[in-house]
Amino acid sequence: MFERNDDARNSVHGNGADHAAQSIQNNTPNNTSNNTSNNTPNYSVSDDVRGLLDGVQAGRELTAKDAERLLTAVGPDFHALIAAADLARSQDCGDDVSYVVCRNINFTNVCYVGCSFCGFARHKDDAIDAYDRTHEEILAKCKNAIERGATEVCIQGGIHPNKTHEDYRDILLAIKAVYPDLHIHAYSPEEIDFGHRKSGMKLEEYLQWLIDAGLGTMPGTAAEILDDEIRDILSPNKLKTGRWVEIIKAAHGLGLRTTATLMYGHIEKPRHIAGHLDLLREIQKETGGFTEFVPLGFIHERNLLFNLLGARPGPSMLEDLRMIAVSRLFLRPWITNIQISWVKMGHKLGQMALYAGANDFGGTLMEESISRESGSDFGENTPPEEFRRIIREVGRVPVERRTLYDVVARFEDPANDPISLEPKKDVELSGPARSRRSLEKAQSGSNADAPAA
Ligand code: SF4
C-alpha cells in the first residue's frame, strides 16, 4: 500500500543523496584514476553514465533501467545528462522553439472521481463555485480566443455525474457550427471512458462519432503515472493503465492523434517514471500517434495528496530538468517534441529546460484553473509576444505552430513581429507619487514629463 512521506523522501531524495555522496567520493583529489593530479578537483562523469550518454549519441535506445539510473544523476553526471539532452534536442529539432496560441476552456468543475492530487473538482451542489458552462458561455470564450489569435481550444472538464455521452458531442457540434476552422483539442481518456460507458457503443464507434462532430486531437492527460500500484493511491476511482492504453490506441488507430503526459514529483520513484516512458515509447512504435510528450510537475499546496497523504511537495529543480532530459534521450527518435509546462515550472525554469532537451513551450492557455486551484502561482496566460521574448532571451528562434506542429510563422527577426492582440493590461504603479503621476501620464499618451529619476 501507500508508502509514507518519509519513505518516499528517502526513496528519491535519499537515492540522490547516496549518489551525490558516491560521486563526491569518486571525485575526491585522492581518486587518481582519471588523469588528474592529487590536488586538482575532479569533475569527471561516472563511467556508467558516460556509457549511457555515449550510447545514445551512437543511436542506442535507453532501457527502462538506464532511464532509472539517469533519473538519479547528480553533480557532474547531472551536468553531463543535461548537455547530452541539449545536444540531442539540437540534432532532433534544431534551435527553433515552438508554441501554440490556444485557450483552455473547462466546461465544468463538477467531478466525483476524487483524485487526491486535484484541487479543481467541486461537488455539484457546491453553491459557491461549482459551475457547468452553457454552450453560449463556451462560444463566448471561443470568440475571445479567436480575437486573440488562437488556432486551438483545449476543452476538458470534470466527470459530472449528470452528463451523458451526447453532451460531449454537443459541445463539439456547437463550436464547429460557428467556428468551423477552430481546432478542437478535447477530452481526456477519463472523459472518453465516461462518455463511452454511457453510450452503449463500441469504443471505436464512439470515438469516430466524436471525430465526425469535430474532435481534432485528444489530450493524453489522466495518465499521471501509468502504473496501477501508484494509480490506486492517487486516484482509486480513475481509469486503470490498461484502459488508458486501450483508449489511446483506439484513438490513434482512427487517426486521432493525442499528446502524452506524466505527472511526477509526488509518491512515484524513478522506476515508475522509467516504466511509464517505456510504455509510451512502445505505444508510439506501434501507432505513431503521439504528437508530443509533456511532463507535468506535481503542484502540491492545496490538495489531499500532499496535505493528508504525505506526498513530496512537487519536484525539485533537479528533478524537473532531469525529467526533461531523460524524456528527450529515452523517447528519441520516436517522440521528438518535448514540451515544457510553464504553468508548473514558470518561465525562468522553462528557459533552463530549453537547455535540457525541451523544444516546445506549450500553449498560451489564456485561462488555466487546474494548476492554479492546486496552488500554482505562475499565472494563467502567456501571450505570444511574451513567448517570443522568453525564447529569444535564451538565443533560440520562436515559432508559432498549430496543434499538429505545422508552422504558422517563424519569427526570426523581432522587427517583423505582429502587433499584440492581447487586451491592454492595467498596471498598478507603485513607487513615489511624483514618479507614479509621470508614468501614468506617459501611459495615457499625454506629453508628460519623463518620470523622475
Ligand atoms: S483530476 Fe480530473 S478526474 Fe480527477 S478529480 Fe480532478 S477533475 Fe476529476
Image (tube, rainbow, N blue to C red):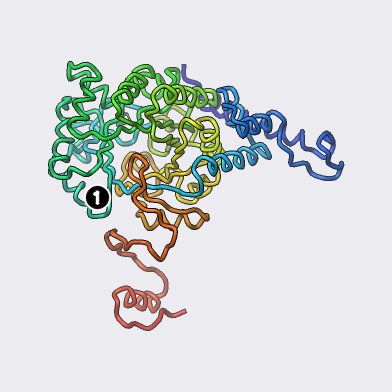
Choose top left, top right, bottom left or bottom right for residue 118: top left
How far across and how far down the image is residue 57, in percent?
Answer: 62, 34
Please say if 410 is above or below 60: below
Q: Residue visible at 27% across and 47% down?
A: 151
Residue 78 falls left or right of residue 113? right
Identify the residue position indicated by label 1 in the image: 145
Please say if 129 is above or below 448: above
Choose top left, top right, bottom left or bottom right for residue 161: top left
Q: Residue visible at 59% across and 30% down?
A: 59
Q: Residue visible at 48% across and 36% down?
A: 313
Please say if 95 is above or below 201: below
Residue 120 falls left or right of residue 391? left
Residue 50 falls left or right of residue 304? right
How far across and how far down the image is residue 248, in percent?
Answer: 34, 24
Choose top left, top right, bottom left or bottom right for residue 427: bottom left
Answer whether residue 54 is visible to the viewer in this image.
yes
Residue in the foreground of this view, choosing between 339 and 237:
339
Q: Residue most toward the right?
A: 38
Report helix, strand or loop for mark 1: helix
Question: What is the crowding at mark 1: few (fewer than 14 residues within 10 Å), some, or many (at least 20)?
Answer: many
Answer whether residue 14 is visible to the viewer in this image.
no
Ligand 1 is found in which quarter of the picture? Answer: top left
Q: Amino acid at mark 1?
A: Ala
Q: Residue visible at 36% across and 23% down?
A: 235
Residue in the foreground of this view, choosing between 184 and 37:
184
